Image (cartoon, rainbow, N blue to C red):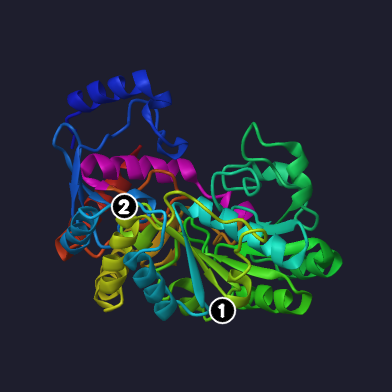
């Protein structure tokens, strides 16, 4: 059905006058007059300025795992900020949240706070370099670890043809403005390629401070590690004294109460968290082994930030983790996710469309391809134009995943059975309309 857009267009015209392209993040640029601004949100729903309602499967790119405006979270924040928002000393909510993270997440013995996932991974890289006395970081093609120069190499937005031969890949800068000199500090390897990983580490381990890995590639539709791949990273890090950093910004507190480390049974030396940690409030954390974490000290390894551990974020995290620790939200998300995945598979099977469901029900993607993608290079072969066409028609009907096939569907515990049923009805209509041309 055609949705009303007059007020939306007027609002976005206003936004473009004062912000480049009308957004505060390049990831929010849609273009073509298809932008949908948000007027309000509640539970699993968004409303635009024309009062069109959408079932939201973006959830702010993952954070709102309990749904928008969750009363327990909002009430705790409202009560907490009445007594101050930021201090130059430690407060109760910081300690409570750190205790909760340590209790929930395998391998985490101490915690420091940050304000974003990028900030958390940046501080983890610094700690790995300080701990080992080495400078290079190894990351995987297609992985995203934040919007800063050290890690914006060979991300999902880079052309795979520029990455070179998979046995000797080239780091590709993901933006103009990144100093070319930083290329000497990064190694970028194909994900799920144990042979190339092992050969590279054995040859260059003396330079490698850390291996940072998204246990599920969140910008490649939720691409999972092949069996044994995370275990290989762990064993190589143990053998060669390399710090293993599990970037759980997207998977933390989403795949399970203890995140991907619990889900896959592989524990890093350091782990980074954000997104679902605060149900949409800005907060992030670095956690890990006591030996490493104690390196954060004046005159040793720098970590600071005026807003690190602020009341707003930590109060939200305190309430969010308290609810997640009960396990009830995961039961809901798992049930809704499985119903969606089963329904989407049934619809696409009936239409004879080649596809693969990626990820897990809590965080899944759809790749329209003959062969299942397993890394950035194979993901590039998927039919992203078909995906975008179907998703835009689905959004017009009232369900809103990201139209970029690299972004997974993020589910919240606020989703109802009726939301899933409506989404599948509209998805089937969108597929049929797209295939009909």
Q: In this view, does 10 lie above or below 181?
A: above
**Which residue in the structure is indicated by mark 1?**
266
- Please state the extent of the stretch shown in magenta in the rendering: 376-399
Label 1 neighbour load within 10 Å: few <14, some 14-19, many 20+: some
Secondary structure predominantly adopted by residues drawn in magenta:
helix
Rendered location of residue 217, percent (x, y):
53, 59
Q: Is residue 51 left or right of residue 66?
A: left
Position above or below: 287 against 147: below
The front one of 183 and 428 is 183
Mark before the other along the chain sequence, 2 or 1: 2
Q: Which residue is drawn at 18% across and 37% down?
A: 1
Where is the C terminus found, in terms of image quarters? top left
Residue extending furthest right?
A: 203
**Residue 41 appears in the rendering:** yes
Identify the secondary structure beneath mark 1: loop
The residue wearing badge 2 is: 59
Dot 2, crowdedness within 10 Å: few (<14), some or many (≥20)? many
The question of residue 393 being in magenta is answered with yes
**Which is nearer the eye, 165 or 15?**
15
Answer left or right for 403 relative to 13: right
Measure the alpha-carbon separation of dots 2 and 1: 27 Å
């Amino acid at each position: 059905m055609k949705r009303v857009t007059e007020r939306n267009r007027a609002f976005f015209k206003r936004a473009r006058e004062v912000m480049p392209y009308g957004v505060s993040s390049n990831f929010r640029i849609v273009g073509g007059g298809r932008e949908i601004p948000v007027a309000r949100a509640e539970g699993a729903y968004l409303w635009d300025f024309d009062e069109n309602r959408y079932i939201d499967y973006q959830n702010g790119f993952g954070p709102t795992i309990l749904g928008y405006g969750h009363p327990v979270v909002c009430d705790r924040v409202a009560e907490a900020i009445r007594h101050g928002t930021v201090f130059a000393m430690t407060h109760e909510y910081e300690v409570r949240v750190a205790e909760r993270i340590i209790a929930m997440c395998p391998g985490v013995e101490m915690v420091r706070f940050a304000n974003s996932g990028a900030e958390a991974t940046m501080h983890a890289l610094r700690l790995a370099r300080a701990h080992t006395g080495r400078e290079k970081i190894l990351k995987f093609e297609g992985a995203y670890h934040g919007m800063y120069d050290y890690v914006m190499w060979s991300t999902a937005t880079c052309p795979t043809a520029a990455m070179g031969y998979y046995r000797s890949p080239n780091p590709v800068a993901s933006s103009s403005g990144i100093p070319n000199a930083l290329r000497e500090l990064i190694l970028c390897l194909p994900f799920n390629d144990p042979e190339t990983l092992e050969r590279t580490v054995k040859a260059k381990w003396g330079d490698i401070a850390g291996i940072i890995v998204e246990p599920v590639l969140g910008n490649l539709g939720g691409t999972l590690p092949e069996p044994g791949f995370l275990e290989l990273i762990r064993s190589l890090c143990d053998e060669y004294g390399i710090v293993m950093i599990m970037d759980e910004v997207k998977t933390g507190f989403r795949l399970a109460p203890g995140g991907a480390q619990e889900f896959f049974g592989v524990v890093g030396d350091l782990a980074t968290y954000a997104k679902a940690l605060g149900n949409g409030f800005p907060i992030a954390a670095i956690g890990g082994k006591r030996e490493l974490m104690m390196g954060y000290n004046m005159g040793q390894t720098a970590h600071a930030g005026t807003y690190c551990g602020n009341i707003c974020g930590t109060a939200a995290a305190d309430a969010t983790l308290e609810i997640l620790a009960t396990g009830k939200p995961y039961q809901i998300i798992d049930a809704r996710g499985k119903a969606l995945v089963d329904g989407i598979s049934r619809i696409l099977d009936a239409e004879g469309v080649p596809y693969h469901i990626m990820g897990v029900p809590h965080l899944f993607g759809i790749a329209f391809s003959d062969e299942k993608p397993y890394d950035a290079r194979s993901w590039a072969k998927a039919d992203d134009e078909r995906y975008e066409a179907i998703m835009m028609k689905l959004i017009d009907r009232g369900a809103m995943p990201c139209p970029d096939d690299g972004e997974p569907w993020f589910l919240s515990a606020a989703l109802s059975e009726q939301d899933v049923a409506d989404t599948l009805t509209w998805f089937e209509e969108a597929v049929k309309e797209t295939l009909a041309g």
